[in-house]
């Protein structure tokens, strides 16, 4: 009986030790899992300096979710919640650098340029979606092998094609008005393309400059009387006033060509350019590859997909008949403020 009791007590102590050891090991596993989860939690900074960039950001976040980056589970976003400019934009980007975030996504040429300058020392990866002309903007020297810590989506150099669309769509136009900010690299790049092609099409460009909101307002109030059309550039300085520009154009029955589909949606006769939401989504796989270990400098710059949008409601208002072959080419046709193909 004494031997049995002793064995029982020894077995009980052994079982007790096994239970204690198991609890201890489970706690270590739990801590390890928690630490692993914390390490897998990524932070991405988001920034834009213009309203259209908000659509880029929306497209980027939705595409990232489709790639498995679920907010609140394995990724969080650091974002001001709206577009910011000047010192506010600089402060927002600096806060991302100080956090630090794992990657910054920018929308808009000005935002990408500022992010590039501020992150150069820290080498935080930056994905832009979009910069109109990254080389002219001074962000990189080589589109195929950017080098450094920044890559992304650029606008195709297709402004000459858009000018041809305007001339072919509205036969007889001779004098085309262009308002631009010469300090805006995106606008300067686009204007260079248009200038080279205008003489081949037999049209004259009536080019004016505006640096400030006041100068833009003044220019719009004093549009020349002899212009036949308006050609908008990818220029945030000017396009902040697009509602007024487009209303004046409709009142004067002037066709307007815009650099992104949003201008056609807002009242331009047509636009040939990016869809901001889609450009943002296009940048998401680039960010995914970087977060998984690829170097931004080894990833070629991609060109944003381009779309033709035609506003038939505007065409009716300004008395222009759009040939059927243009409508067949269009990706979006706007009729009575609704879009359908």
Image: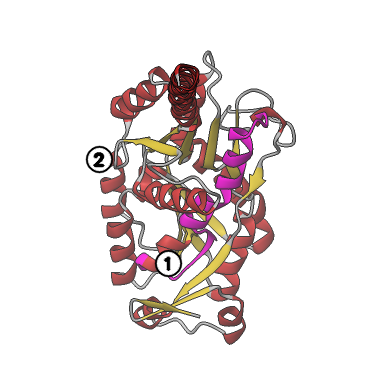
Instruction: Say which element carries label 2.
Output: helix
Q: Position of residue 181 (x, y in %)?
A: 42, 39
In the foreground, 300 or 264: 300
Question: Looking at the image, which residue sits at the far right?
Answer: 144
Label number found at residue 214 = 2
Q: Is residue 294 rendered magenta in the image?
A: yes
In the foreground, 308 or 148: 148
Q: How is the image coloured?
A: secondary structure
Label number found at residue 264 = 1
Q: Earlier in the sequence, mark 1 or mark 2?
A: 2
Question: Quadrant of the rendered structure where residue 83 is?
Answer: top left
Label number found at residue 35 = none
The stretch in magenta equals: 266-295
Q: Position of residue 310 (x, y in %)?
A: 48, 73
Label 1: how many residues lie within 10 Å, few (<14), some (14-19) or many (20+)? many
Which residue does the image show at 55% across and 81% down from the upper left?
Answer: 327
Which residue does the image show at 69% across and 25% down from the upper left?
Answer: 147
In the foreground, 37 or 317: 37
When the figure is inspected, residue 25 is found, relative to residue 105, above or below; the finding is above
Instruction: Say which element carries label 1.
Output: helix
**Residue 233 seen in the current view:** no
Which residue does the image show at 44% across and 23% down from the upper left?
Answer: 12
Question: Looking at the image, which residue sits at the far top?
Answer: 121
């Amino acid at each position: 009986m004494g031997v049995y009791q002793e064995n029982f007590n020894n077995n009980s102590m052994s079982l007790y030790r096994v239970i204690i050891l198991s609890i201890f090991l489970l706690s270590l596993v739990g801590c390890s899992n928690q630490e692993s989860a914390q390490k897998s939690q990524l932070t991405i900074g988001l920034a834009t300096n213009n309203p259209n960039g908000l659509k880029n950001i929306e497209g980027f976040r939705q595409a990232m979710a489709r790639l498995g980056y679920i907010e609140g589970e394995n990724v969080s976003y650091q974002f001001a919640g709206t577009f910011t400019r000047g010192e506010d934009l600089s402060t927002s980007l600096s806060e991302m650098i100080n956090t630090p975030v794992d990657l910054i996504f920018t929308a808009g040429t000005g935002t990408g340029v500022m992010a590039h300058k501020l992150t150069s020392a820290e080498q935080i990866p930056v994905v832009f979606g979009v910069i109109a002309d990254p080389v002219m903007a001074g962000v990189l020297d080589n589109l195929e092998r950017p080098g450094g810590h920044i890559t992304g989506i650029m606008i195709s150099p297709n402004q000459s094609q858009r000018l041809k669309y305007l001339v072919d769509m509205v036969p007889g136009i001779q004098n085309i008005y262009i308002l631009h900010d010469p300090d805006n690299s995106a606008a300067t790049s686009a204007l260079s393309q248009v200038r080279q092609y205008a003489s081949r099409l037999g049209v004259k460009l009536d080019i004016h400059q505006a640096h400030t909101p006041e100068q833009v307002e003044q220019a719009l109030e004093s549009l020349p009387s002899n212009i036949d059309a308006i050609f908008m550039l990818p220029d945030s300085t000017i396009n902040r006033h697009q509602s007024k520009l487009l209303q004046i154009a409709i009142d004067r029955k002037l066709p307007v060509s815009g650099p992104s589909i949003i201008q056609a949606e807002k009242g331009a006769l047509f636009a040939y350019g990016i869809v901001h939401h889609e450009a943002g989504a296009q940048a998401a796989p680039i960010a995914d590859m970087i977060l998984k270990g690829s170097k931004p400098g080894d990833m070629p710059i991609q060109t944003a997909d381009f779309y033709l949008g035609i506003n038939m409601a505007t065409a009716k208002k300004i008395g222009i008949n759009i040939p059927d072959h243009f409508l067949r080419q269009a990706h979006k046709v706007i009729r009575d403020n609704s879009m359908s193909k």
